[in-house]
Image (cartoon, rainbow, N blue to C red):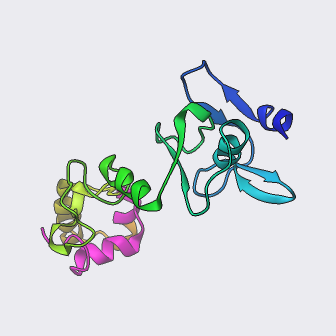
């Protein structure tokens, strides 16, 4: 197993990330078959080189790189701690710099261009509204701004970006 594992790793220096180069899950984690079942590569790395993962604990990346299997970058902790680190490092849906607990306070959730997944800026929204007034269709605007035409419709009917 260890030999097969290493054949799928791009090991860059002792302290750097060792990226998984083989099969990947949709969520960006490496995958390897262990005992005939798919397993996350970083968890297999931890088990091979550190030890058994205690029941109910997660394997966390100190480097925030899902492809990394360097055992020096891996540790075990609770899901609660994993989520705390995720929020602290802005890997969730909160805006950068927002540690306000936006998950429990809807009025403080990031909106518009401050949302980490936003493709549009506030200026884009103003432009979309102006161009729509000049006769551009939802589809044309979607193509111009590289978003779905339904996103344009939601902007124009106030279902999204309604704070502007």
Between 20 and 137, the one nearer to me in the picture: 20
Residue 6 location, quadrant: top right
Magenta stretch encompasses residue 62: no
Question: Compared to 123, does 16 lie above or below?
Answer: above
Q: Is residue 151 left or right of residue 25?
A: left
Q: Residue at x 53, y 43 (%)?
A: 75
Q: Is residue 115 left or right of residue 8?
A: left
Q: Residue at x 86, y 56 (%)?
A: 35
Between 11 and 23, the one nearer to me in the picture: 11
Tell me if residue 147 can be seen.
yes
Q: Residue at x 22, y 66 (%)?
A: 109
Task: Give the image location of residue 111, x and y in percent.
Answer: 21, 64
Task: Give the image location of residue 30, x and y in percent.
Answer: 67, 47
**On-image quarter of the C terminus:** bottom left
**On-image quarter of the N terminus:** top right
Q: Which residues are magenta?
A: 141-164
């Amino acid at each position: 197993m260890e030999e097969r594992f290493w054949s799928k790793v791009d090991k860059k220096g002792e302290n750097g990330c060792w990226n998984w180069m083989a099969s990947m899950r949709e969520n960006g984690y490496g995958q390897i078959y262990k005992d005939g079942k798919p397993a996350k590569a970083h968890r297999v790395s931890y088990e091979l080189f550190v030890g058994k993962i205690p029941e109910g604990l997660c394997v966390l990346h100190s480097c925030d790189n899902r492809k990394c299997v360097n055992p020096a970058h891996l540790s075990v902790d609770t899901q609660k701690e994993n989520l705390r680190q995720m929020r602290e490092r802005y890997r969730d849906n909160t805006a950068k710099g927002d540690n306000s607990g936006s998950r429990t306070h809807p009025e403080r959730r990031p909106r518009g261009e401050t949302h980490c997944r936003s493709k549009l800026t506030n200026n884009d929204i103003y432009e979309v509204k102006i161009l729509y007034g000049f006769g551009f269709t939802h589809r044309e605007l979607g193509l111009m701004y590289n978003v779905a035409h339904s996103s344009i419709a939601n902007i124009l009917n106030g279902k999204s970006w309604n704070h502007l």
